[in-house]
Image: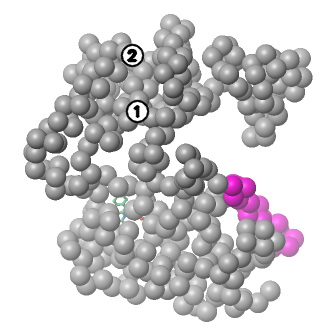
């Protein structure tokens, strides 16, 4: 294998799958991009950069909250070989840093080496052959309402109409219950930073709408009495209900729930499931990942069963109950 062979600009995933590279770089954050440039500078061109997202930038692609910036001086937070003399601030903001990374990627010709939407799922080293075999997820695409959203940033996915909750409850403990709800109110907010500071009647109207929706949802999940309390003071089950209500703030068309019934008491499970039923009745599609088989069988129209990451069955709850592979894997013989 020649170390100087160029990676073809349009290698298909199938071609790439059978290729051998001198180096595979995981990710296109600051580290991955720096490594790619260093390899090129050293004359080594036979490398591949695998990036699970759809854009370079790593942490500077993922974090887009207002005010996001580096915390060491910009002239130090850049590659020494690619100084930037016109940082607009001493501590550059996220969009500027992301722009800098993209500039470097283009200037040093890294794009042909990058495969986006390629999540590394395994890496095995063969001692005898002295090679790594790197596996990636199947490279399929995620489409929602006709749009390819593979690797799209979370805020875009949210604005397109997908909401989600997390298995481990993720609420802002030092913010009030109401503030947690308002943080989630994506389309009720002004996107333009300057307009957020100018208290226009339009902005006040948007905020009022968001507050009214938050009150309605808190009422629905039985948390309105806690509206002014710190979220960190709620019980675990209540925090789960808060995360659920917050996920509904942007009025998602598709709601992804990751183990909503885990670690909460039976009364709360029933409560949560009633909310899911009512959402579904009002036209929201709900995708539930859940280990509690009673919940799954009670609430689902269609069930997909995975065992060790492999799909072993799909069908109605009644079909799943009778499926011998499911009985063996989940219910035991
Ligand atoms: C707000 C904020 C401010 C910061 N300020 C500073 C600062 O001032 N100074 C400083 O030194 N550091 C700072 N950091 C730390 C920052 O994370 C690092 O400086 C640096 O950007 C990390 O780069 P990285 O490439 O190592 O990782 P990341 O930027 O996290 O990039 C990793 C990349 O790998 C991809 N990836 C991960 N797993 C897989 C997989 N299995 N398959 C394929 N792709 C994968 C990810 O999608 C991502 O694109 C800050 C971080 C934040 C969030």
Within the image, what quadrant is residue 5 found in? bottom right
The reply, left or right, for residue 123 in relation to residue 90 is right
Sequence-first tag of 2 and 1 = 2
Q: Is residue 56 left or right of residue 185?
A: right
Question: Does residue 24 appear left or right of residue 245 in this picture?
Answer: right
Residue in the picture at 26% in, 68% down: 92
Q: Are marks 2 and 1 in contact (CB under 8 Å)?
A: no
Please state if 59 lies on the left or on the right of 258 as rendered: left
Image position, residue 274 (x, y; %): 51, 13
**In the rendered image of this protein, does residue 302 appear above or below residue 44?**
above
Q: Nearer the viewer, mark 2 or mark 1?
A: 1
Rendered-image quadrant of the N terminus: bottom right
The residue located at (38%, 55%) in the rendering is 63
Q: Secondary structure at mark 1?
A: loop
**x, y (%) of residue 28?**
52, 68
* Residue 206 vertical placement versus 152 (above, below): above
Residue found at x 10% / y 50%: 198
Query: Mark 2 = which residue?
Result: 221
- Can residue 236 be seen here? The reply is no
Q: CA distance from mark 2 to mark 1?
A: 15 Å
Which span of residues is magenta-colored? Answer: 121-140
Ligand 1's image quarter is bottom left
Residue 305 appears in the picture as rendered:
yes
- Coloring applied to the structure: one colour
Please identify the quadrant where the C terminus is shown: top right
> Would you name the residue on which mark 1 appears?
251
**Secondary structure predominantly adopted by residues drawn in magenta:** strand
Q: Answer whether residue 129 is magenta in the image.
A: yes
Question: For residue 306, which quarter of the picture?
Answer: top right
The x and y percentages for residue 54 are: 54, 62
Note whether ligand 1 is within 8 Å of mark 1. Answer: no
Q: Is residue 149 magenta?
A: no
């Amino acid at each position: 294998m020649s170390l100087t062979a160029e990676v073809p600009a349009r290698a298909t995933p199938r071609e790439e799958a059978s290729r051998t590279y001198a180096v595979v770089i995981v990710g296109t954050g600051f580290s991955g991009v720096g490594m790619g440039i260093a390899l090129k500078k050293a004359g080594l061109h036979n490398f591949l950069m695998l990036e699970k997202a759809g854009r370079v930038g790593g942490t500077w692609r993922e974090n887009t909250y207002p005010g996001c910036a580096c915390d060491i001086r910009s002239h130090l937070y850049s590659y020494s070989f690619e100084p930037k003399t016109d940082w607009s601030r001493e501590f550059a903001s996220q969009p500027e840093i992301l722009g800098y990374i993209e500039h470097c990627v283009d200037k040093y010709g890294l794009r042909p080496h990058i495969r986006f939407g390629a999540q590394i799922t395994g890496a095995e080293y063969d001692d005898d052959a002295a090679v790594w075999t790197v596996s990636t997820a199947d490279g399929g695409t995620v489409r929602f309402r006709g749009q390819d959203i593979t690797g799209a940033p979370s805020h875009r996915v949210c604005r397109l109409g997908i909401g989600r909750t997390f298995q481990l409850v993720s609420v802002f403990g030092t913010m009030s219950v109401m503030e947690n709800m308002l943080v989630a109110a994506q389309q009720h907010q002004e996107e333009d930073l300057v307009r957020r500071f100018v208290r226009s009647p339009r902005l006040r109207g948007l905020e009022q709408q968001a507050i009214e929706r938050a009150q309605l949802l808190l009422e629905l999940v039985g948390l309105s009495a806690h509206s002014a309390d710190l979220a960190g003071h709620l019980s675990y089950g209540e925090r789960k209900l808060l995360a659920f209500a917050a996920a509904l703030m942007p009025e998602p068309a598709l709601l992804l729930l990751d183990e909503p019934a885990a670690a909460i008491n039976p009364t709360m499970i029933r409560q949560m499931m009633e909310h899911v039923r009512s959402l579904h009745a009002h036209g929201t599609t709900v995708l539930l990942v859940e280990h509690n088989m009673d919940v799954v069988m009670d609430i689902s129209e269609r069930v997909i069963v995975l065992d060790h990451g492999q799909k072993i069955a799909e069908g109605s709850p009644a079909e799943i109950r009778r499926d011998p592979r499911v009985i063996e894997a989940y219910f035991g013989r």
